[in-house]
Amino acid sequence: MSNSERPRPRTLAEALRSWDDAALGELLRNRPDLATPIPADTSQLAARATTNASAARAINRLDEFSVDLLEALSALPEPVDVKALAAGVDQPVEVVQPRVVELLALALVWGNEDDLRPIRAVHELLGPTPAGLGPITTRHFGDLDQLIEDAGPEAREVLARLTWGPPTGSVEKAERPVTIASAKTPVEQLLARGLVVPRDANTVVLPRQIGLHLRGGRVLASTRPTPPPLGGKEVSASIADRAAAGAALELVRQVDRALEQLGTDPPPVLRTGGIGIRDLRSLATKIGADEQTAGAVLEIAYAAGLVAAVEVGTSELWLPTGSYDDWLELDTAHRWGQLVISWFTGLRAIGLIGRRDSSGATAAARERLINALAPDLERLLAPEVRQLTLRALSEAGRGTAPAAESVVTWVAWHRPRRGGQFRDDLVEWTITEAALLGLTGLGALASHAMVLLQEEPVADDLAQAIQPLVPASVSEVLLQADLTAVAPGPLVRAVQDDLAAMADAESHGGGGVYRFSESSVRRAFDLGRTAEQLHEWLAEHSRTPVPQPLTYLIDDVARRHGVLRIGAASTYLRCDDESVLTQLLSSNLPGIRFRRLAATVVVSPSPPDMVLSRLREAGLAPLGETFDGVVHVTSAGNRRGEPPRRRTSRDFVDSAIELTEDHVKAVIERVRAGDRVAAERPAEHTSGEATAPAEVISVLSEASEGNTRTWISYVDHNGNAAERIVEPVRVADGWLTAYDEGADQPRTYALHRIAAARPLPD
């Protein structure tokens, strides 16, 4: 029997009961919120499906044409069949019918194709004026064309302005009732004939019947059953792939350099979270990027778990995490893949950096700029828009770079009720970030980025896809007489670290150019290298002979390095009696070390308060003094505990619920069992009245003796009422032992929780 031949169900619950398990399973997969918690029966499932919250989730994931169909169904007078709906949206029936089947399968519409009815929540969510049409009036008009003609040309102009919405207009307050004979203005002519009706003293509204008549039976001026075209320019696909791969390598380098800088000179965490503008600007200069790119690089690293806010003493600083060290051990392709997956699935809306916080609770908060790494960047819509944007780039075709405006329109068609202007901004930001990440080249989607459109993309798949475009790592450089070293390809990590210690990077790309200078060589000596070690390293890792100017530079810096020494000491002790200090050096105080700098001065790395305490325990009488020699008098201070760690991110709950096949099957089984219980519920207990405990025990005891199927109403330990059909086995010690219908093992029920019980006929 076709859908149109089936008898029309009276309610959505009745419609759902007629569905097979496959259809119910598809409903649960498309609307997973209906399965949590598991509904007791179909009536509860239907009630949950018609709530505004659940219906809004489903409608927000519909494309523009499906929303248009819902608007048309909400606006057209019932009953509405497929032909009337197709006429309302001015599309062929064969285009509308498959979409109607989808809406029926989502339980947003119920009935059959001859009588389609949107659920109540659809009417409420689409508002009182669907498609710009006013409310329904009960007045009968007769010949509408003649009535409109008689109102006059000026009145018809007013109707023309109201036809396609909004259906309301402002008027001056009328001092007297208006009749056709007394009507003077165009609006009065319309009011007298009922072609507009007053909403209040200063507003009139066009009734829905009149609006539909003026529109020629169409609900919407135009509809688009397919996505808008993705216009753009053609580019070389192979060149686009190589350009994208180059951007991917540059991203990995920038993340590496940024986190290396954070590890060397970590910036503080702002009181409101994030990194300060000055710190971000300084970091951008150091990694050779603009401020916006530096913020994006930090956000991508943060999403990948490579950087975090860490408490250091009394401060909170942005530092690389332990995961950064693990990330460095990966090859370039896998490092890139990890960054891309973290960005693609993350909630961080990077484009908000530097913008005002429009979601702030107060006016002052809304005026505040959003900083990089701040908690304000979390947005639930971000991952969904990223996926749709990359889908749009893929739909454009290989070697096609669609214009940003066409991608924005394409995504808006797929999610017309999600985000509005913010959704459009996210699309544009995603296009920019995709270029930074190396997912696009010359504006076209790279072939290795197609992995992200798989059902469950992983970093390993991305790494394998881009691997052919990543040049092999090298461990040798080309030394030149101008004191530069040219890397012919990406350097092995250990070689890159050693070279960066003795030379400054001047340019980057597939390889890079490094320049030796007096300051860079001195930096290598400061890190503990010797001149001999530098000469050996250069000879081992250079494909060309070591230039003589470089050899002279290293030797010259080595001769002057270390002439002046500097060290650290937390405490000094001075005494005019040299013997006291000599005795102190040989005393071996526990946990204290001393070093003699002069006959009357010794120093210690231990803090002054600890040294002072140990000396007093040893029977000495030291006196504290300040840096300038003034006697320092100490006083007992109040002890303070460490402040609690401040939150630096906001918790978000994703509305998308993943259902496993086992979960779907369990929900369907529970719903079917609940329907069977409801169908066999004794008529005298439909009101939910409790049975006396003695009668309950009597019914269950008799049922256990005669193996009789029994209906029970049971309240669990959480206070949730449920109904069961059971086969009692034993009643004793305050417990009922019985088999649930279809169960292989018996269950136990506390007798005091069984509110009612009735035997069922065989």
Image (cartoon, rainbow, N blue to C red):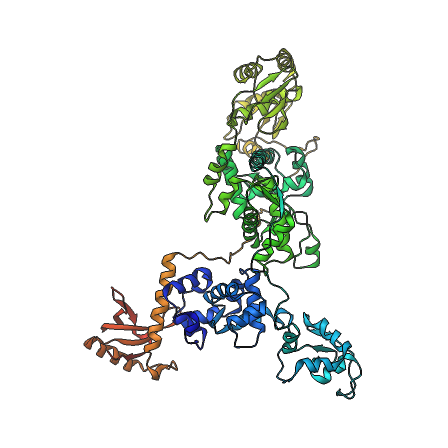
- In the rendered image, which quarter is residue 757 located in? bottom left
Q: Nearer the viewer, residue 436 or 293?
A: 436
Task: Please tell me which residue is depicted at 71% across the width and 31% down the height of the picture.
Answer: 628
Whether residue 308 can be seen here: no
Q: Estimate the x, y position of residue 25 in percent, counting from the top left.
A: 40, 62
Left or right, 313 with reference to 632: left
Q: Nearer the viewer, residue 506 or 586?
A: 506
Quadrant where the N terminus lies?
bottom left
The image shows residue 488 at horizontal and vertical percentages of 56, 23
Q: Quadrant of residue 555?
A: top right
> Relative to the observer, which residue lies in front, 519 or 353?
353
* Residue 650 placement (x, y as % from top left): 56, 53
Q: Residue shown at 63%/74% (left/top)?
A: 212
Where the C terminus falls, by quadrant? bottom left
Q: Quick check: 572 above or below 349? A: above
Q: Who's the residue at 66% across and 40% down the image?
A: 280
- Residue 45 appears anywhere in the view: yes
